[in-house]
Amino acid sequence: MKKIVIFFEPMGRRVETHANRTILEVAREIGIGIRSDCGGLGLCGKCKIILTKVCGEVSKPTDNEYRFITPEELSLGYRLACQVRVLSGSVNVFIPRESRVEVGRRVVGVSVLSDEYFGLRPAVRKFHLKLPEPSLQDFRPDLERLRDALITLHVIDKESELQVPLDLLRMLPELVREFRWNLTVTMWHNKLISIEKGDTTRRMFGLAIDVGSSKILIHLVDLVTGKTIATDFVENPQLMYGEDIVTRITYASRSPENLRKLQRLVIEAINNVIAKMTSRAGIDVRDIYEAVVVGNSVMHHIFFGIVPKYIARSPYVPAVRRMISYPAKEVGLNINENGIVTSLPLIAGFVGADAVANLIATRIYESDEISLILDIGTNTEVLLGNSEIILAASAPSGPAFEGAQISCGMKAVAGAIESVQIDGSKVMYRTIGDLRPRGICGSGLIDLLAEMYRNKIIDERGKFVAVNNPRVIYDEVPRFIVVWKEESASGKNIAITARDIDELLLAKAAIRSGWTLLCKKLGIDPSDISKVYVAGSFGMHINVDNAISIGLLPPVDRAKVIFIGESAIIGARMALKSTEARRKAEDVVRNKVKYVELSADPEFRRIYIQSIPLNP
C-alpha cells in the first residue's frame, strides 16, 4: 500500500502512514488533538487546518468544506482535517490555535461543600502484625496463622472468609519469612491485597477520579489523615473522537477495537497524571490501594471497557447500575498491583455515578425543603427533591453552552470571551486571561442572549429585530458582531449568528423543560425551590441574573443559587474516605431516587416548545 508523509506544525511531528487517510485520522492516531465537535463527520467546521506545503496530491474539497471554508481561505490552503485525504507524497499541516484541543479553565477550590461529613472509615485498612513463627508444636499454615491474627484484632470474624488474590498467595510463604514474621497487611473489606515488610501503616493512599466527558479530575488522598494532598486534571483525550458522548458511543460501537481505544486513551491519561502527582508528592504508586471513580453512565462504561451503545438506544439501559469494584490491574490503572477500582452506582440512562456523587456531596436527601441540582453539560443532569423523594432526569441539551456547534464558540480557555455587556451599539467584554478575543465560551454566550434581548436586538424567539445597529448584519445568515476583526486574535470578526442563537435556545429549552417537568411531577412551582445547586466548572462563571432572565435557571431569588463547582469529585472523595458514604449512596439510589425518562413523558414536547422563548 502506498505510503505518504505528514508534517504537523507547530508540534514539529512527522508521521509516515498509508495514503488515502484523513488528516484527522492520522492526528488522532499519534495523539495530536484537533477539534472535532461532530466526531469527524464534517458537520461542525471546527477542524480547520492549513496545508502550508503539498508535495504530492490531496483530495479535492468536499461539499462540507465549501460550506465552512470561504474561497479566500481555500486559496490560502485552509481545509477541514476530517475531510481532506492525502493521496500521495507529503504535506505540511499547520493546526491553528482555534482548531486545537485545549485544556479548559479549572475551578481550583469549592468552599461551600466539605468531604468530612461521613468521617474517615475507608474500605482500605492497614494492620501491623508480629506473627508467631511456626514450630513442630504450632504447624498452622501461613495463611491460617495470618487469618487468626486478624481475627484476634477483630478485623474479621471467625465465620468470615479471608479472600486472597492468587498471585499474593503464591508469594505468601516467601514474604512472611523474608519479613521475619514482622509485617503489615493491607485489607480491602475482607480481602487481603498487600503484605509489606515491617510497619507501613502510615503509608496508605487512595484516588478520587471524576471522569468527565471534557475533563478528568484526580485527587490524591491520604487515607490515614483524610487530607487531600494533591490535585490535578487533564483534558479527556477522547475529545478528539467527538465533543459529545453520543458521538463517542457511535465511535465505540463500530468495533471492539474502537471501544478499547477509547478506554485506553482515558486510562493512559489518568496513569500519566498519577505518575506526576506521586512524583511531586514523593509517594510510591504501590502505596495507593483504591481509586473511587465517578462519571456519567457513558464515561463509566467506557472507563471499565463495557459496551455503551445500549445507553443511547431506547429504552436507554446501562449494563449495570449497582456499585462495582474490580482489581485495578484488570482496568489498567497504575496503582498497587492488587489495588481496587470502585465506582459509585448509576441511576439510569445517562444519569450516572457523577450525579450520585453530587447527591452525596450536597445531601439534599436529608432536607425537608425542595432542592435542585443542575450539572450543565452535553447531557444536563437534573435532580430535584428532598428527604422523601428525588426525581432524576437527563436533559439532552447538547454541547452548545460548551461552545460546540456555535460558529465562534469555544471552550473556557485563554482568549475566550467570558462576559459581555451591551449598550446600544457598544459592546463591553472580558476575556479569560485578558488576552485578545479568540471566540466566545458558555458564560459569554449566556450574557449575549440576555443582553441582546434586553437591548431589543433580538426578540423573545431569538429573531433579529434591531434596525440601524451597525453591529447587526443582515445577509444570508444574519449576525451580530461582538468583536470587530481589528480587535480579535484571528483578524476575523467574532459574531453570533441567527443559527447560533437557535442552537442556544434549543439547548436552553432542553434544560428548562427538564426542571420544569420535574417540578410539575412534584406538584410545585419552580419559584418554590429552596436551593438551586449549579455543579461543574461551567456554572462558577455564569451571571446568575442573566441565566435566570433567559430561563436557563428557575426564577428564584439569586441568593438561593449556589455554585458548587466540581462537586462530583467531592462526592468521590467522600466515598473513598468512608464506607458509610458508599452505603448511603446505594441506599439513596435504591430507595429515594426515581428516574424520569423525559423523551417518554407525554408532556415533555409541549413543555420543551414552551421553554424555547427568552423569558424567565
Image (cartoon, grey):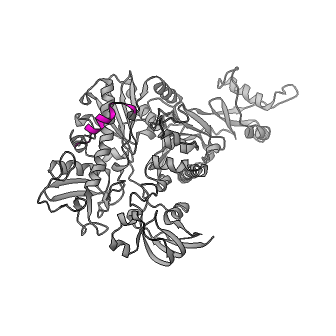
Q: Residue at x 55, y 44 (%)?
A: 303
Find residue 364 and report its image quarter. Answer: top left
From the viewer's perspective, tell me whether residue 61 is left or right of residue 464.
right
Query: Residue 352, image x and y in percent?
Result: 47, 37
Magenta range: 600-613
Q: Quadrant of the C terminus?
A: top left
Q: Quadrant of the N terminus?
A: bottom right
Vertical position of residue 118 compared to residue 570: above or below: above
Residue located farthest toward the right when viewing the structure as drawn: 136
Q: Nearest the camera: 301 or 131?
A: 301
From the viewer's perspective, tell me whether residue 349 is left or right of residue 334.
left
- Is residue 609 within the magenta segment? yes
- Is residue 96 within the magenta segment? no
Q: Residue at x 19, y 45 (%)?
A: 460
Q: Residue at x 75, y 31 (%)?
A: 131
Query: Residue 165, image x and y in percent?
Result: 71, 36
Query: Residue 344, image x and y in percent?
Result: 51, 34
- Residue 221: tell me if it is visible: no
- Residue 116: tell me if it is visible: yes
